[in-house]
Amino acid sequence: MKQLLTFIAFISFIGLSACGQVEAQMGSFNSTKNIGQQEKQIPDLSIAVYDGEEQIELLPIDLINEDYLSEWAGELARGESGYDQAMRPVKWRNGELIGGKDHVILYEAELIENILQLPVWDRSVVLPVERQEVAAKVSDIENMNDKVIGKGKTTFDKSVGGRMENIRLSTESIDYVVLGSGDTFTFNGVTGERTLENGYKEATVIMDGDFVDGVGGGICQTSTTLYNAVLDAGLTVIERHPHSLPISYVEEGLDAMVNWGTADLRFRNDFDYLSLYGGASIKMLVKFGLKFAHKKYFICFARCLGKAFSF
Protein backbone atom coordinates (compact mmCIF):
# COMPACT_ATOMS: atom_id res chain seq x y z
CA MET A 1 0.00 0.00 0.00
CA LYS A 2 2.83 2.36 0.84
CA GLN A 3 4.45 1.59 -2.49
CA LEU A 4 1.17 2.34 -4.32
CA LEU A 5 0.85 5.76 -2.67
CA THR A 6 4.43 6.54 -3.55
CA PHE A 7 3.74 5.62 -7.19
CA ILE A 8 0.62 7.80 -7.33
CA ALA A 9 2.51 10.74 -5.84
CA PHE A 10 5.25 10.23 -8.42
CA ILE A 11 2.72 10.18 -11.25
CA SER A 12 1.08 13.33 -9.89
CA PHE A 13 4.44 15.09 -9.72
CA ILE A 14 5.16 14.15 -13.31
CA GLY A 15 1.69 15.34 -14.33
CA LEU A 16 2.15 18.65 -12.59
CA SER A 17 5.54 19.03 -14.18
CA ALA A 18 4.06 18.30 -17.58
CA CYS A 19 1.34 20.88 -17.03
CA GLY A 20 3.99 23.39 -16.11
CA GLN A 21 5.85 22.62 -19.30
CA VAL A 22 2.67 23.00 -21.35
CA GLU A 23 1.88 26.29 -19.67
CA ALA A 24 5.41 27.43 -20.28
CA GLN A 25 5.16 26.42 -23.92
CA MET A 26 1.78 28.12 -24.26
CA GLY A 27 3.20 31.25 -22.67
CA SER A 28 6.09 31.13 -25.08
CA PHE A 29 3.67 30.70 -28.02
CA ASN A 30 1.51 33.62 -26.88
CA SER A 31 4.59 35.75 -26.49
CA THR A 32 5.68 34.92 -30.02
CA LYS A 33 2.17 35.67 -31.30
CA ASN A 34 2.18 39.05 -29.55
CA ILE A 35 5.51 39.89 -31.16
CA GLY A 36 4.09 38.89 -34.53
CA GLN A 37 1.08 41.10 -33.99
CA GLN A 38 3.37 44.03 -33.25
CA GLU A 39 5.10 43.44 -36.57
CA LYS A 40 1.91 42.93 -38.63
CA GLN A 41 -1.41 44.10 -37.23
CA ILE A 42 -4.71 42.82 -38.54
CA PRO A 43 -5.71 45.43 -41.16
CA ASP A 44 -8.39 48.02 -40.55
CA LEU A 45 -11.65 47.07 -42.27
CA SER A 46 -11.61 50.11 -44.59
CA ILE A 47 -9.61 51.51 -47.49
CA ALA A 48 -8.19 55.01 -47.27
CA VAL A 49 -8.43 57.06 -50.49
CA TYR A 50 -5.84 59.79 -51.04
CA ASP A 51 -5.54 62.74 -53.40
CA GLY A 52 -1.78 63.11 -53.30
CA GLU A 53 -0.94 63.15 -49.59
CA GLU A 54 -4.41 64.23 -48.43
CA GLN A 55 -6.87 61.56 -47.30
CA ILE A 56 -10.29 62.33 -48.75
CA GLU A 57 -12.37 59.26 -47.93
CA LEU A 58 -12.57 55.89 -46.12
CA LEU A 59 -14.31 53.04 -47.96
CA PRO A 60 -15.83 50.26 -45.80
CA ILE A 61 -14.28 47.01 -46.98
CA ASP A 62 -17.59 45.15 -46.82
CA LEU A 63 -18.94 47.43 -49.55
CA ILE A 64 -16.05 46.83 -51.94
CA ASN A 65 -17.38 45.30 -55.14
CA GLU A 66 -17.31 46.33 -58.77
CA ASP A 67 -20.87 47.70 -58.90
CA TYR A 68 -20.45 49.83 -55.78
CA LEU A 69 -17.04 51.12 -56.89
CA SER A 70 -18.35 51.98 -60.36
CA GLU A 71 -21.14 54.16 -58.94
CA TRP A 72 -18.82 55.71 -56.32
CA ALA A 73 -16.03 56.50 -58.83
CA GLY A 74 -18.54 57.99 -61.28
CA GLU A 75 -19.88 60.37 -58.64
CA LEU A 76 -16.34 61.23 -57.53
CA ALA A 77 -15.33 62.07 -61.10
CA ARG A 78 -18.49 63.50 -62.66
CA GLY A 79 -20.74 64.46 -59.75
CA GLU A 80 -21.74 68.00 -58.84
CA SER A 81 -18.42 68.58 -57.06
CA GLY A 82 -16.51 65.95 -59.05
CA TYR A 83 -12.89 66.06 -60.12
CA ASP A 84 -13.51 66.11 -63.88
CA GLN A 85 -13.25 69.64 -65.18
CA ALA A 86 -12.98 70.95 -68.73
CA MET A 87 -10.30 73.55 -69.31
CA ARG A 88 -11.63 77.08 -69.22
CA PRO A 89 -9.27 79.49 -70.97
CA VAL A 90 -8.23 82.74 -69.37
CA LYS A 91 -9.35 86.22 -70.42
CA TRP A 92 -7.20 89.31 -70.95
CA ARG A 93 -8.50 92.14 -68.76
CA ASN A 94 -6.66 95.35 -67.84
CA GLY A 95 -3.23 93.80 -68.20
CA GLU A 96 -4.12 90.60 -66.32
CA LEU A 97 -5.20 87.05 -67.14
CA ILE A 98 -8.34 86.12 -65.21
CA GLY A 99 -10.92 83.36 -64.89
CA GLY A 100 -9.05 80.32 -66.19
CA LYS A 101 -9.50 76.73 -65.01
CA ASP A 102 -7.13 73.82 -65.49
CA HIS A 103 -8.17 70.65 -67.26
CA VAL A 104 -8.67 67.85 -64.69
CA ILE A 105 -9.66 64.23 -65.28
CA LEU A 106 -10.02 61.33 -62.85
CA TYR A 107 -9.45 57.94 -64.49
CA GLU A 108 -12.36 55.96 -63.07
CA ALA A 109 -11.54 52.53 -64.54
CA GLU A 110 -7.96 52.70 -63.31
CA LEU A 111 -9.12 53.72 -59.82
CA ILE A 112 -11.56 50.79 -59.60
CA GLU A 113 -8.94 48.32 -60.79
CA ASN A 114 -6.36 49.64 -58.32
CA ILE A 115 -8.77 49.13 -55.40
CA LEU A 116 -9.88 45.64 -56.45
CA GLN A 117 -6.26 44.51 -56.83
CA LEU A 118 -5.01 45.85 -53.49
CA PRO A 119 -2.91 43.30 -51.52
CA VAL A 120 -4.53 42.07 -48.30
CA TRP A 121 -2.26 44.14 -46.05
CA ASP A 122 -2.47 47.31 -48.18
CA ARG A 123 -5.39 49.52 -47.17
CA SER A 124 -4.80 52.73 -49.16
CA VAL A 125 -5.01 53.96 -52.74
CA VAL A 126 -4.07 57.23 -54.49
CA LEU A 127 -6.47 58.78 -57.00
CA PRO A 128 -5.20 58.55 -60.61
CA VAL A 129 -5.81 62.20 -61.50
CA GLU A 130 -4.32 64.08 -64.47
CA ARG A 131 -4.11 67.87 -64.42
CA GLN A 132 -3.21 70.15 -67.33
CA GLU A 133 -2.58 73.76 -66.40
CA VAL A 134 -3.63 76.70 -68.56
CA ALA A 135 -0.57 77.60 -70.62
CA ALA A 136 -1.21 81.28 -71.41
CA LYS A 137 1.05 83.74 -69.57
CA VAL A 138 1.01 87.53 -69.26
CA SER A 139 4.55 87.86 -70.59
CA ASP A 140 3.56 86.12 -73.82
CA ILE A 141 0.63 88.45 -74.42
CA GLU A 142 2.65 91.57 -73.74
CA ASN A 143 5.01 90.56 -76.55
CA MET A 144 2.20 89.59 -78.91
CA ASN A 145 1.61 91.41 -82.20
CA ASP A 146 -1.94 91.29 -83.56
CA LYS A 147 -2.14 89.36 -86.79
CA VAL A 148 -5.35 87.85 -88.12
CA ILE A 149 -4.91 84.10 -88.63
CA GLY A 150 -8.57 83.21 -89.17
CA LYS A 151 -11.92 84.94 -89.52
CA GLY A 152 -15.62 84.16 -89.82
CA LYS A 153 -18.64 86.35 -90.57
CA THR A 154 -22.43 85.97 -90.52
CA THR A 155 -25.37 88.39 -90.60
CA PHE A 156 -28.70 88.55 -88.78
CA ASP A 157 -31.84 90.66 -88.61
CA LYS A 158 -31.41 93.34 -85.93
CA SER A 159 -35.20 93.72 -85.52
CA VAL A 160 -35.40 90.37 -83.69
CA GLY A 161 -34.59 91.75 -80.26
CA GLY A 162 -34.33 88.52 -78.28
CA ARG A 163 -31.99 86.91 -80.79
CA MET A 164 -29.82 90.01 -80.98
CA GLU A 165 -29.49 90.20 -77.19
CA ASN A 166 -28.53 86.52 -76.96
CA ILE A 167 -25.84 86.98 -79.59
CA ARG A 168 -24.57 90.05 -77.77
CA LEU A 169 -24.35 88.22 -74.43
CA SER A 170 -22.60 85.18 -75.88
CA THR A 171 -20.06 87.24 -77.81
CA GLU A 172 -19.42 89.30 -74.70
CA SER A 173 -18.57 86.09 -72.85
CA ILE A 174 -15.86 85.32 -75.39
CA ASP A 175 -14.38 88.82 -75.25
CA TYR A 176 -10.58 88.48 -75.28
CA VAL A 177 -10.35 84.82 -74.41
CA VAL A 178 -6.71 83.74 -74.72
CA LEU A 179 -5.51 80.24 -75.67
CA GLY A 180 -1.92 79.33 -74.95
CA SER A 181 -0.23 76.49 -76.81
CA GLY A 182 -2.11 73.30 -75.91
CA ASP A 183 -5.03 75.15 -74.25
CA THR A 184 -8.60 74.08 -75.04
CA PHE A 185 -11.67 76.25 -75.63
CA THR A 186 -15.17 75.10 -74.66
CA PHE A 187 -18.07 77.27 -75.78
CA ASN A 188 -20.43 76.07 -73.05
CA GLY A 189 -17.73 76.42 -70.41
CA VAL A 190 -16.96 80.01 -71.40
CA THR A 191 -20.48 81.33 -72.04
CA GLY A 192 -22.21 79.40 -69.24
CA GLU A 193 -25.78 78.14 -69.13
CA ARG A 194 -28.28 80.12 -71.15
CA THR A 195 -31.06 80.98 -68.69
CA LEU A 196 -33.40 83.89 -68.03
CA GLU A 197 -31.51 84.52 -64.79
CA ASN A 198 -28.31 84.96 -66.80
CA GLY A 199 -29.96 87.56 -69.03
CA TYR A 200 -30.81 85.42 -72.07
CA LYS A 201 -34.08 85.97 -73.91
CA GLU A 202 -36.54 83.79 -75.76
CA ALA A 203 -35.97 83.50 -79.50
CA THR A 204 -36.28 80.88 -82.22
CA VAL A 205 -34.38 77.63 -81.67
CA ILE A 206 -34.36 74.25 -83.40
CA MET A 207 -35.82 71.51 -81.20
CA ASP A 208 -36.80 67.99 -82.25
CA GLY A 209 -36.53 68.90 -85.91
CA ASP A 210 -38.72 72.00 -85.73
CA PHE A 211 -38.34 75.75 -85.19
CA VAL A 212 -39.76 76.77 -81.80
CA ASP A 213 -39.23 79.50 -79.22
CA GLY A 214 -36.69 78.82 -76.50
CA VAL A 215 -34.36 80.65 -74.11
CA GLY A 216 -31.02 81.44 -75.73
CA GLY A 217 -32.11 81.31 -79.36
CA GLY A 218 -29.39 82.79 -81.56
CA ILE A 219 -26.30 81.67 -79.64
CA CYS A 220 -25.64 79.03 -82.31
CA GLN A 221 -24.91 81.89 -84.68
CA THR A 222 -22.17 83.00 -82.29
CA SER A 223 -20.72 79.49 -82.07
CA THR A 224 -21.03 79.02 -85.84
CA THR A 225 -19.25 82.30 -86.59
CA LEU A 226 -16.48 81.36 -84.18
CA TYR A 227 -16.28 77.87 -85.69
CA ASN A 228 -15.66 79.33 -89.14
CA ALA A 229 -12.87 81.53 -87.77
CA VAL A 230 -11.35 78.48 -86.06
CA LEU A 231 -11.43 76.50 -89.32
CA ASP A 232 -9.83 79.40 -91.16
CA ALA A 233 -7.10 79.60 -88.52
CA GLY A 234 -6.32 75.89 -88.70
CA LEU A 235 -6.95 75.19 -85.03
CA THR A 236 -7.77 71.64 -83.94
CA VAL A 237 -11.53 71.05 -83.61
CA ILE A 238 -12.29 68.54 -80.84
CA GLU A 239 -16.09 68.68 -80.78
CA ARG A 240 -18.63 70.16 -83.16
CA HIS A 241 -22.27 69.31 -83.93
CA PRO A 242 -24.41 70.26 -86.98
CA HIS A 243 -28.00 71.48 -86.75
CA SER A 244 -30.80 69.03 -87.54
CA LEU A 245 -32.24 71.53 -90.04
CA PRO A 246 -30.57 73.83 -92.59
CA ILE A 247 -29.81 77.35 -91.36
CA SER A 248 -29.75 80.50 -93.44
CA TYR A 249 -26.69 82.39 -92.16
CA VAL A 250 -23.97 79.93 -93.24
CA GLU A 251 -23.35 77.29 -95.89
CA GLU A 252 -24.31 73.71 -95.16
CA GLY A 253 -21.63 71.87 -93.18
CA LEU A 254 -20.14 75.04 -91.68
CA ASP A 255 -22.51 75.43 -88.74
CA ALA A 256 -21.79 74.58 -85.10
CA MET A 257 -24.84 73.80 -82.95
CA VAL A 258 -24.47 74.12 -79.18
CA ASN A 259 -26.83 73.07 -76.40
CA TRP A 260 -26.16 73.21 -72.68
CA GLY A 261 -25.23 69.78 -71.32
CA THR A 262 -25.45 67.87 -74.61
CA ALA A 263 -23.59 69.63 -77.43
CA ASP A 264 -20.52 71.84 -77.25
CA LEU A 265 -18.03 73.53 -79.55
CA ARG A 266 -14.51 72.66 -78.39
CA PHE A 267 -11.19 73.27 -80.06
CA ARG A 268 -7.51 73.35 -79.10
CA ASN A 269 -4.61 75.61 -79.96
CA ASP A 270 -1.90 73.22 -81.18
CA PHE A 271 0.35 75.99 -82.45
CA ASP A 272 3.39 77.18 -80.51
CA TYR A 273 1.96 80.67 -80.17
CA LEU A 274 -1.02 82.29 -78.51
CA SER A 275 -4.42 82.72 -80.09
CA LEU A 276 -6.75 85.44 -78.89
CA TYR A 277 -10.47 85.91 -79.39
CA GLY A 278 -12.26 89.13 -78.74
CA GLY A 279 -15.92 89.98 -78.56
CA ALA A 280 -18.15 92.20 -76.53
CA SER A 281 -20.75 94.48 -77.96
CA ILE A 282 -21.98 96.44 -80.95
CA LYS A 283 -18.74 98.28 -81.52
CA MET A 284 -16.16 98.24 -84.26
CA LEU A 285 -13.28 98.16 -81.78
CA VAL A 286 -13.81 94.60 -80.61
CA LYS A 287 -12.08 91.63 -82.22
CA PHE A 288 -15.16 89.42 -82.06
CA GLY A 289 -18.56 90.99 -81.84
CA LEU A 290 -21.31 92.74 -83.70
CA LYS A 291 -20.54 95.26 -86.39
CA PHE A 292 -23.13 97.52 -88.02
CA ALA A 293 -23.42 96.63 -91.69
CA HIS A 294 -26.84 97.75 -92.89
CA LYS A 295 -29.98 99.44 -91.63
CA LYS A 296 -31.57 96.04 -91.05
CA TYR A 297 -28.64 93.75 -90.44
CA PHE A 298 -25.70 93.40 -88.13
CA ILE A 299 -22.61 91.39 -88.87
CA CYS A 300 -21.42 88.91 -86.28
CA PHE A 301 -17.74 88.41 -86.94
CA ALA A 302 -14.84 86.59 -85.35
CA ARG A 303 -11.09 86.93 -85.78
CA CYS A 304 -8.32 84.76 -84.40
CA LEU A 305 -5.11 86.61 -83.62
CA GLY A 306 -1.63 85.20 -83.25
CA LYS A 307 1.99 86.29 -82.96
CA ALA A 308 3.09 87.89 -86.16
CA PHE A 309 6.52 86.22 -86.17
CA SER A 310 4.91 82.77 -86.24
CA PHE A 311 3.97 83.09 -89.90
Image: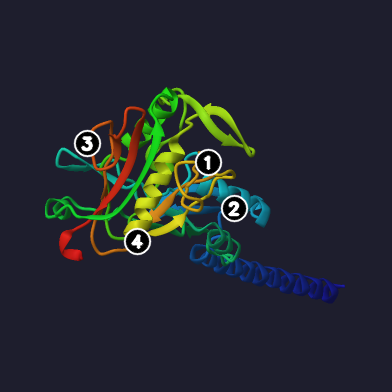
Q: Check whether the beta carbons of the residues at disc 1 and disc 2 lie within 8 A of each other.
A: no
CA gap, disc 2 and disc 3: 66 Å
Q: Nearer the viewer, residue 19 or 65?
A: 65
Residue at the far left in the pictured view: 143
| Residue depicted at 53% across the width and 59% down the height | 111
Mark yes or no: residue 250 visible. yes
Disc 3 or 4, which lies upstream in sequence? Answer: 4
Instruction: Quadrant for residue 1, please give it.
Output: bottom right
Q: How many neighbours does mark 2 have within 10 angstroms: few (below 14), some (14-19), or many (20 or more)?
A: few
Label ID, residue 52: none
Q: Check whether the beta carbons of the residues at disc 4 and disc 1 lie within 8 A of each other.
A: no
Q: Amino acid at mark 2?
A: Leu
Q: Amino acid at mark 3?
A: Met
Disc 4 or 1, which lies upstream in sequence? Answer: 4
Label ID, residue 45: 2
Mark yes or no: residue 52 visible. no
Residue 42 in percent (x, y) is at 57, 59
| Residue depicted at 54% across the width and 33% down the height | 205
Q: To which residue does mark 4 refer?
A: 234
Q: Check whether the beta carbons of the residues at disc 3 and disc 1 lie within 8 A of each other.
A: no
Q: Amino acid at mark 4?
A: Gly
Disc 2 or 4, which lies upstream in sequence? Answer: 2
Label ID, residue 261: 1
Residue 228 in percent (x, y) is at 39, 51
CA gap, disc 3 and disc 4: 25 Å
Q: To which residue does mark 3 refer?
A: 284
The secondary structure type at the circle numbered 2 is: loop
**Given this view, does label 1 or label 2 mark the residue nearer the observer?**
1
